[in-house]
Each structure stands twice: as structure tokens, then as C-alpha cells.
Amino acid sequence: MHAPASLSLVVVNGQPFALPQSTLASATLLHVLRNDLSLNGPKYGCGLGQCGACTVLVDGIAARACVIPAQGVAGREVTTLEGLPGRCSCTAGLHPVQQAFVDEQAAQCGYCLSGMVMMAVALLERNPDPDEAAVRRELSGNLCRCGTHVEIIRAVLRAAVLMREAQA
Ligand code: FES
């Protein structure tokens, strides 16, 4: 798909979107995802790159959408929570990380959850068999004010098992 000169192409969850360059030039990626594309998985927490609630994947790498200028992702692939089902060819429904978070009941208020899940997906795509220390390190920059960390860590370790089993 080619975009006219005044538009830029952004691929989100496998779908191309032609967005006005004026929009991309003046907004963060989080703003565009939530306000222009109605993708409300990524959350606005601190707006300063410090809490992780807004985490998405850019070309498969976890990134904080609240501090990324939207024009920085023109021509790149962005994945949000909404795009996870289908990202892992190992299951038909929920992504195994989402399933594991459900199985372990790893949520209270749920505000941090999208960011936690996206960080976990990035980790497990890089390292399919992390130990608990690696999971703790990966998630150390994502804040959960409810204190659900124990269940979240259990969920990530469970997701690793689910993904390895499904791909065996
Ligand atoms: Fe982006 Fe807090 S909202 S890191």
C-alpha cells in the first residue's frame, strides 16, 4: 500500500494505516494508538516512560509508546495487546501469555496488565526458557500498584511452558 505524500504509513497489528503526517508530527505513538486508532490496550500511566503501562512492541521490541514520537514508527510494525492473538502460531485463541495471565489470575485492577503482557511477550520471543530471575529483571521497570507481582511472575513462567509445549 502506498500513501499519498501528505500521509504516512504505519502498520499496527498487521494492518496498514495511512495517517496524516501532521498528526504523526505532533503526537506520541500512545496518543495515535488510543485516540486515532481506538486501540485502548496500551494505557496512559505516567506519560514519562517510567511505569510501563503503555508498552507496545515496535518491530518486536518492547517500547514505551508514551515517549515515542508517532512519526518515529512510520514504516515500522507496531503490535499492541489487541494484536497478540495470532502472533503466536502455537494457539488459535488467546496468546499463551494472555492465557497464562488468566490461568494465574494475575490481575487486580488490571491497569498495568497490558504493559506486563507485552513485556512478557518480548522476553519469551527472545528467550523461550527464562528463569525467575530473568523474568523479574525484565519486568522490574513495570509498576503494579496493587502488588500482584507474585502472580504476574508465575504467569510469565507458565506462559513460557505453554509456548514451549505448543511448539514442541
Ligand atoms: Fe508510558 Fe508510563 S505511561 S511509561
Image: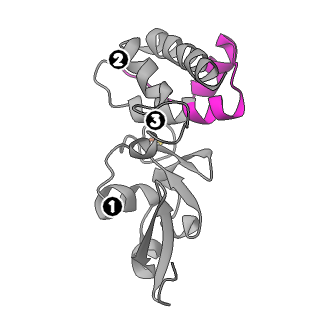
Q: Which amino acid type is shown beneath numbered disc 1?
A: Leu
CB at mark 3 closer than 8 A to ligand 1?
A: yes
Residue annotated with mark 2: 146
Seen at 53% across and 58% down, the residue is 68
The location of residue 98, given as percent across then percent down, is: 43, 27
For the C terminus, the quadrant is: top right
Q: Categorize mark 1 by other alpha carbons within 10 Å: few (<14), some (14-19), many (20+).
A: few
Q: CA distance from mark 2 to mark 3?
A: 14 Å
Marks 1 and 3 in Cβ contact (< 8 Å): no
Residue annotated with mark 1: 37
Picture layout, residue 147 above or below residue 47: above
Could you tell whether 33 is left or right of 128 in the image?
Answer: left
Residue annotated with mark 3: 115
The location of residue 48, given as percent across then percent down, is: 48, 47
Pick whichever of labels 2 and 1 is earlier in the sequence.
1
Q: Which of the two marks, 2 or 1, is nearer to us in this view?
A: 1
Pick whichever of labels 1 and 3 is earlier in the sequence.
1
Q: Residue furthest bottom?
A: 5
Ligand 1 quadrant in view: top left
Span highlighted in magenta in the image:
121-146
Tell which of 14 and 8 is nearer to you.
14
Q: Which amino acid type is shown beneath numbered disc 2?
A: Cys
Picture layout, residue 44 above or below residue 163: below
Any part of residue 67 in sight: yes
